[in-house]
């Protein structure tokens, strides 16, 4: 039988203490790492589950979760469900996420769009000068960061 793949909690338990000693991290990162290390272990407590059938006396420990929004054990199923919904909304075409700075006069439109959902701005001479850098970036060299294609 193949050994189970290590989980993030296993990696944090093994390497986390040394990493935290040698690297300066914000307090919230320390707390997150400890929460993930302790998730679904005796450190957070738990309860005993017993089979509901009368003829069965099987019991098992069920440990409490950390309920941290960054924990892959706690939020993994919710994340997969959310991603499946987002993928279902995508059109079968290539997408690029482009980030750029709006001129100050247009920022109220952008802020209201964020509150109300996506809006499509009509072609405008104000936006045309900003599209130059985006068009100049060849797709093969485009820098893709976590937030997508970045243009300045």
Image: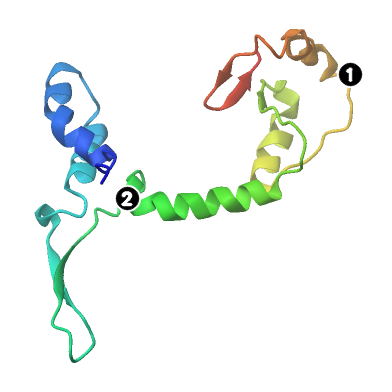
Q: Is residue 82 above or below residue 123?
A: below
Q: Which residue is mark 1?
A: 125
Q: Residues within 10 Å of mark 2 (few under 14, many from 20)?
A: some
Q: Is residue 2 above or below residue 97?
A: below
Q: Is residue 62 above or below residue 6?
A: below
Q: Is residue 43 left or right of residue 54?
A: left
Name the quadrant containing residue 17. Answer: top left
Q: Is residue 110 left or right of residue 57?
A: right
Q: Is residue 45 left or right of residue 36?
A: left
Q: Position of residue 3 (x, y in %)?
A: 24, 42
Disc 1 vs disc 2: which is toward the camera? 2
Q: Is residue 119 left or right of residue 101?
A: right
Which residue is rendered at x = 71% and y = 44% of the image? 90
Q: Residues within 10 Å of mark 1 (few under 14, many from 20)?
A: few
Name the quadrant containing residue 97. Answer: top right
Label annotation for residue 144 = none
Q: Position of residue 146 (x, y in %)?
A: 52, 26
Q: Earlier in the sequence, mark 1 or mark 2?
A: 2
Q: Is residue 73 above or below residue 3?
A: below
Which residue is rendered at x = 88% and y = 24% of the image? 124
Q: Which residue is mark 2?
A: 73
Q: Position of residue 68 (x, y in %)?
A: 30, 49
Location of the C terminus (image quadrant)? top right
Name the quadrant containing residue 65. Answer: bottom left
């Amino acid at each position: 039988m193949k050994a189970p793949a290590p989980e993030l909690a296993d990696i944090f338990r093994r390497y986390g203490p040394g990493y935290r000693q040698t690297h300066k991290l914000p307090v919230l990162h320390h707390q997150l790492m400890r929460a993930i290390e302790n998730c679904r272990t005796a450190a957070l407590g738990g309860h005993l589950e017993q089979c509901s059938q009368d003829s069965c006396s099987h019991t098992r420990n069920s440990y409490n979760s950390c309920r941290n929004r960054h924990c892959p054990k706690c939020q993994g199923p919710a994340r997969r469900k959310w991603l499946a919904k987002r993928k279902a909304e995508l059109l079968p075409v290539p997408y690029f996420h482009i980030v750029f700075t709006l001129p100050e006069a247009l920022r109220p439109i952008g802020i209201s769009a964020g509150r109300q959902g996506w809006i499509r701005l009509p072609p405008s001479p104000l936006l045309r000068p900003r599209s130059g850098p985006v068009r100049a970036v060849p797709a093969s060299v485009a820098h893709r960061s976590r937030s997508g294609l970045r243009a300045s």
